[in-house]
Image (spheres, helix red, strand yellow):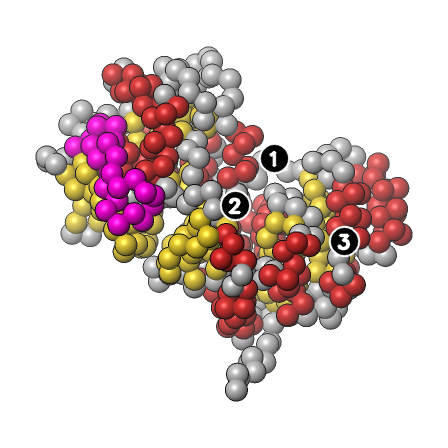
Amino acid sequence: MPQPPPKMLAQPIALLGTGSDVGKSLLATALLRILRQEGFAVAPFKAQNMSNNSHVTAQGLEMGRAQAVQARAAGLEPEANMNPILLKPSGEQTSQIILQGKVVGQLKAGDFLTHRHPFLKIALEAYHDLARRFELIVIEGAGSLAEVNLRQRDIANLGLARELKAPVVMIADIDRGGVFAQIVGSLEVLEAADRALIKGILINRFRGDIALFKEGKRWLEERTGLPILGIIPYFSDLRIPAEDAVTLDRLTDPPPPKGEKRAIAVLRLPRISNFTDFDPLFNLPGVECHYLSRPRSLTPYDLLILPGSKATLADLAWLKKQGWAELILEFQAQKKPIFGICGGLQMLGQEILDPEGLESTLHSAQGLGLLPLTTTLLPHKTLRQVRAKDLASQSLLWGYEIHQGQSRCLRPLAPLFAVGSGAEGFVDAQGQVMGSYLHGLFESAEFLQALLRRLWGGTVDLGAPYPDPYDQLADQVRPHLDLKAFKRVLQAQG
């Protein structure tokens, strides 16, 4: 007979949204820090995440980046049980599936939907492990809580909340418009048992004078019978990594840079991974940083970056088809620096081989030919945190590796970094074309300053050190959150 689950010590609360990109991740992060400040032992949890933005734990396990950020907000080391199921899209209908931090294979969308129970079991086991060790668990949902066509297979939203008897707070985004329809419409399509789980509403991204929404708040509370637990303003100066690449849309293909500022271009690959690598570059004072998707001249830019990719061969084919290859070679001919990270490094080489068809039906492709490397994609996935030393400046840096490719030099190349007694990364003889498998390396301020000084000359202003971003986020959200009402929701039985 199946054993009953262990007694749960933690009280769960689920933050579910009226749609994608309504701010669930950010508000969960804020709430985790606020509850920690209130003295609670609290942990994050997201049963199933779909993102190519991932993190490697100290144990060498892979999890969603958002839950790693939330763990930091709770004062914890990230662990895979905080996100036991991670789907990394690698094609239109296919995702790499990672269970409790380890790759188990590829899965088609339809297959995932028909295998709810094994995945639910994995999610509940991970949750119960956390529940033994913490007082409160803040659960983040996925997408919309009102996807009625997916409800019977749901393991991340109301399906999970009902299993755990977790009270639900519904999050709606007023900035996108139609907030009344978002809230009322979502409630109207739910069956009664699911509707009963919802105990309050958070309205996110309000612009302007909140006093002007007084009548709207009253109408919503009367119409739904639910309390509005907070009306959270639109914050534009946060330094919390985003979860979904949809946030890049606002930063992609802006007008070409003008004026005296230095400028950095990052190619917006269709399957870009770990785009948070570049957050420190977008925060540099006196520097413009742009994501570019539509081909155009790179001449106005001073540095070009090829980012990581979840499907390197497919993104390399896209890059060539769009005409980016010729533009990159023109940029290189102008003697300007190019930096490739992970998949971007592989694209800079001579050839990429995929003999086992791990990424696509393409078994090989010619790279850009800017580094004398050949890369072979292998079943084993390298997952590790790395402490390294920049050989040029002797500055220390931290990074992490997530890749299935192994790159081999066709002729001698200088390394970029020392890692223990070994080496990592590559740089050509001119110091112009560089590449590394390390994600997160630009977060090391000393290395970033040394790199930009080396590439551009002179002193590079990184700006004043930033305060703790999680305390800053909590300080901004707390005044707009009815914390007493929120605590009452915490005590509600789902």
Amino acid marked by disc 2:
Glu
Vertical placement of residue 7 versus 101, above or below: below
Residue 305, position in %: x, y? 35, 30
355 falls in the magenta region: yes
Per the rendering, the mark at residue 243 is 2
Residue 371 in sight here: yes
Relative placement, left or right, of 441 versus 463 is: left
Q: CA distance from mark 1 to mark 3?
A: 33 Å
User: How many numbered circles are shown?
Assistant: 3
Q: Quadrant of residue 412?
A: top left
Relative placement, left or right, of 275 versus 362 is: right
Pointers 2 and 1 in contact (C-beta within 8 Å) = no
Name the foreground residue: 168 vs 465: 168
Name the foreground residue: 193 vs 215: 193
The residue shown at (37%, 18%) is 298
Name the foreground residue: 469 vs 311: 311
Amino acid marked by disc 1:
Ser
Say which residue label 3 marks.
Answer: 189
Say which residue label 1 marks.
Answer: 236
Region rendered in magenta: 350-372
